[in-house]
Amino acid sequence: MTITKNVEKEVLTLALEGRLDTNTAPELENKIAEELTADIQTLILDLKELEYISSAGLRVLLSAQKKMNKQGSMVVKNANEMIMDVFQVTGFVDILTIE
Amino acid sequence: MKELKLRAEAKELEKVQAFVRGEMEAANCPLKAVSQVEIAVEEIYVNIAHYAYPSSDGEVTIRCAVSREEGKVLIQFLDKGIPFDPLAKEDADTSLPARERPIGGLGILMVKKMMDEVTYRCEDGKNILSMVKNL
């Protein structure tokens, strides 16, 4: 998986490319831990190039959402049909802010 | 039925998924079904790697049969690890808000949602997990 970071003032955008699975989820977890400083108010996860997500990936999204609930907001955008399907069946559509 | 045997380690996940994806793509299965099966395969395989063989790396056999005539994909996992029925656990509550959601418990729920039939049995010291996807 490739993670591309962009910071503009208090907005952190992470664009994910590839597969978010058991073996790559720790990479995202570490990246978020590293980049999500206390001054970040908005975290945007751009899933345009994300092809696949499993429960390991969902766990990272959930913990990022919990963090952002405390310090601002999180937005998930450009998820493809397959990934939206996963968000639907797991009830993540109600937890995440999806654009 | 095609078969793949390997050590039950999470890092082998790619090989397992490539095997199943290869079988399904060779039979021209719809892309959506391939992705859904891949998710279910990951959840079960990782479960076996973690729970059936927590301290050592045992062997796991993955079988895959695709029948376009019957419109079905059958996947089986066989291991000789600790008897463990992943389906016995209660499903995660998908209606809870983020702050009340436990981190975890989603894997098996995904398997049940992505596949049409999932069954577990313990036979001759083997865990046998079978799942069917209707095409």
Image (tube, rainbow, N blue to C red):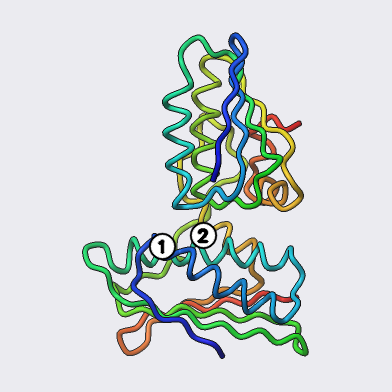
Residue A71, how many percent across, how many down? 53, 14
Who's the residue at 62% across and 75% down the image?
B22
Who's the residue at 66% across and 62% down the image?
B35
Q: Nearer the viewer, residue B105 or A52?
A: A52
Q: Nearer the viewer, residue B65 or A66?
A: B65
Q: Residues within 10 Å of mark 1 (few under 14, many from 20)?
A: some
In the picture of the structure, the residue carrying the numbered disc 1 is: B47
Residue B102, how many percent across, how many down? 46, 40
Q: Nearer the viewer, residue B82 or A2?
A: A2
Who's the residue at 62% across and 67% down the image?
B37
Amino acid identity at mark 1:
Asn
Residue B16, how many percent across, how many down? 49, 70
Vertical position of residue A24 compared to residue B33: above or below: above
Amino acid identity at mark 2:
Ile
Q: Residues within 10 Å of mark 2 (few under 14, many from 20)?
A: many
Number of numbered discs present? Answer: 2
Q: CA distance from mark 2 to mark 1?
A: 9 Å
Q: Is A96 on the left or on the right of B2, as rendered?
A: right
Q: Is B120 on the left or on the right of A16, as rendered?
A: left
The quarter of the rendered structure image containing the C terminus of chain B is bottom right
Label 2 element class: helix
Q: Are marks 2 and 1 in contact (CB under 8 Å)?
A: yes
Give the chain of mark 1.
B
Residue A92, how many percent across, how many down? 64, 41
Give the chain of mark 2.
B
In the picture of the structure, the residue carrying the numbered disc 2 is: B108
